[in-house]
Amino acid sequence: MAADSLAVLPWRAWDSGPARAAWDALAAQAGTPNPFFEPWYLLPGLARFDPQERVRIASLARGGALEALVPLQRAMRYGRHLLPHLAVWLHANAFLGAPLVAAGAEEAFWEALLDWADRNAGSALFLHAAALPLDSALADALMAVGARQHRRVALVHREARAMLASPLGAADYLEQALPGKKRKELRRQHARLAEQGALTVSRRQDADGIGPWIEHFLALEARGWKGSAGSALACADETAGLFRTSMTAAAARGCLERLSLDLDGEPIAMLATLFAPPGAFSYKTAFDERFARFSPGVLLQLENLALLERSDVRWADSCAAPDHPMIDSLWRERRMIGRSSIAIGGAARRALFGRIVSFELSRNPQGLT
């Protein structure tokens, strides 16, 4: 990798010990943390969802140090429409699209990436960045670079998802988040559930027993509505394999917390949380629907408020859909997430892009999806 340059290479070029080490060092310095773009999660996803290596990894090195990294693809469709474009690559189980960029290098990254996109647009009509946190230095830098270069940056979709960010301790936060009647009902459900057997909570951040824990999670999720709908991780070899590989790696690195509510030693609610300080990400949760009347998933989330007591966590992203019926009522803060389309290329291409954006926003402010 040349110094002070943007390189765009097949993703397998990054699957080596030295490359991963540089990547890990970058992730530790990222101004906007994103575990879904760290090597232990991104590379297994690419191996399963892009075996033909259509995805490239763009990286910025300055002064011999890696300062930015993002996976890119050339996509032909945009929503239902045939609109070739460049895009930050995501899959259905990656819940944030923030490029990994060292704090303070955000504008340099966008300048380098957009310069490359101008020169290598091919048939692409624009660059699209999805699932970008809007309250971040990364998003601010994109808007600043766009304004400075007279380059249109169009926010085509925004949504608010539940976030946990408070100086309060767990007990005080719960008291403010839920009315007394609801807290009383949850205490009643906990007591009734405890009558069904020995009720315990398990919280681990090591790698011991990770294999059985993974298989318990996959089976528990598959027995519920996601299994019936065909969307459980275990329903496809690719997603089951990604979960096994990435959770094993995360546990070995100490960045996975396994939280479970157990009845007579068997998990009836489970939660996987990923840590990327100062953030945490509520990655996957599942509960045994045979005990739904006791709200085991909610009871487990009450235990999860212990995140507020951790010195290395300032906020936690729920990774949940907007207006989620459970977590939105308990986690009261909101994280704004957006999709932006960005002009690239010469004057004619940018003029066409302007018409595409105007059409998109006039028909549906939420985007062409």
Image (cartoon, rainbow, N blue to C red):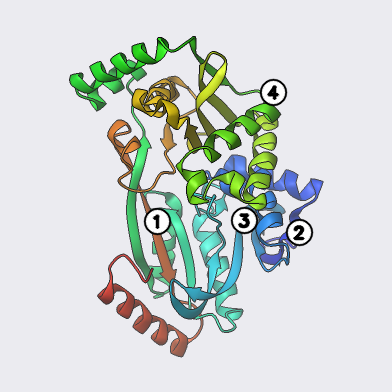
Task: Name the mark on residue 348.
Answer: none
Residue drawn 44% across and 62% down?
142
Residue depicted at 76% across the width and 50% down the height: 19
Of callouts 1 and 4, the N-terminal one: 1
Q: Please, what is the three-letter code of the amino acid marked with disc 4?
A: Gly
The first of marks 3 and 2 along the sequence is 2
Residue 209's disc is 4
Label 1 to label 4, Cα distance in Å?
Answer: 42 Å
Residues at circles 1 and 2 in contact by the CB criterion of under 8 Å: no
- Give the mark toward the camera: 3 or 1: 3
Q: Secondary structure at mark 1?
A: helix
Quadrant for the C terminus in the image: bottom left
What quarter of the picture does the N terminus occupy? bottom right
Residue 140's tag is 1
Task: Please tell me whether mark 3 or mark 2 is closer to you in this view.
Answer: 2
- The percent coordinates of residue 90 (x first, y second) are 55, 58
Q: Amino acid at mark 1?
A: Asp
Q: Which residue is tagged 2?
A: 12
Mark 1 and mark 2 lie on one chain; the one further toward the N terminus is 2
